[in-house]
Image (cartoon, rainbow, N blue to C red):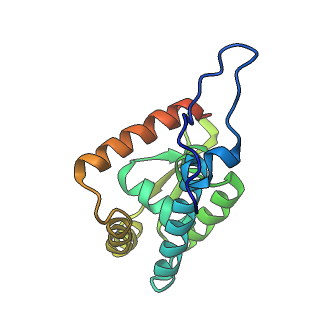
Amino acid sequence: MIERFSGTVLRPLDGPEAKRPTMGEIGLNNFAPYLMNRVISRWNANLADDLKSLDMTTAKMRALAILSITPSVTINELSVFAVTEQSTMSRTLDSLEDQGYIRRQPRPEDMRIRDVTITEDGRAAFEKIWPTMYDDFLKMFQGIEEEEYKTFVAVLHRVLQNIRLHDI
């Protein structure tokens, strides 16, 4: 694509006469949400292809990844962390439970809330897919220096803080 915009993308909108740049002026290659969508779509597609050979879906991988580093979470929390609809997460957990990878237990103080934990078989399954995930991660950040990566992650955290709906 041709770069057409050399102005300020993040213009402050001070006053009623403030003018927003047009999408055409900014261009897709300077519009961060577009670039983030492309990156994540490609990451998800590559990872899904690689996980097929390990008999694993992206939703299952996300759940096991979170549970591998968190002692226990609710289904709602797991849905937020995994960026997955709660209905999709519930079906995913049904499958993971059938496989013996997770356990769901009601909380003694509130039987409506179910805590989800990973089993030893679930840990073993995640350890099997982790090398694939990490290799795909390294491909995505090939040529990126460690300091650039840290800055990138810090900026993403700030953006997330600006737009997030949940405290987690």
- Left or right: residue 67 versus residue 57 is left
Q: Residue at x 74, y 18 (%)?
A: 17
Q: Position of residue 52 (x, y in %)?
A: 51, 82
Observer-nearest of 89 and 44: 44
Q: Residue at x 31, y 73 (%)?
A: 131
Q: Quadrant of residue 154?
A: top left
Q: Residue at x 55, y 30 (%)?
A: 162
Q: Position of residue 21 (x, y in %)?
A: 67, 36
Q: Quadrant of the N terminus?
A: bottom right
* Residue 86 versus residue 124 in the image, above or below: above
- Left or right: residue 148 versus residue 15 is left
Observer-nearest of 32 and 131: 32
Observer-nearest of 143 and 102: 143
* Residue 37 versus residue 72 in the image, above or below: below
Observer-nearest of 157 and 71: 157
Q: Position of residue 20 (x, y in %)?
A: 69, 31
* Residue 42 versus residue 144 in the image, above or below: below
**Res. 129 in view:** yes
* Residue 168 versus residue 120 in the image, above or below: above
Point out the residue furthest to the left here.
146
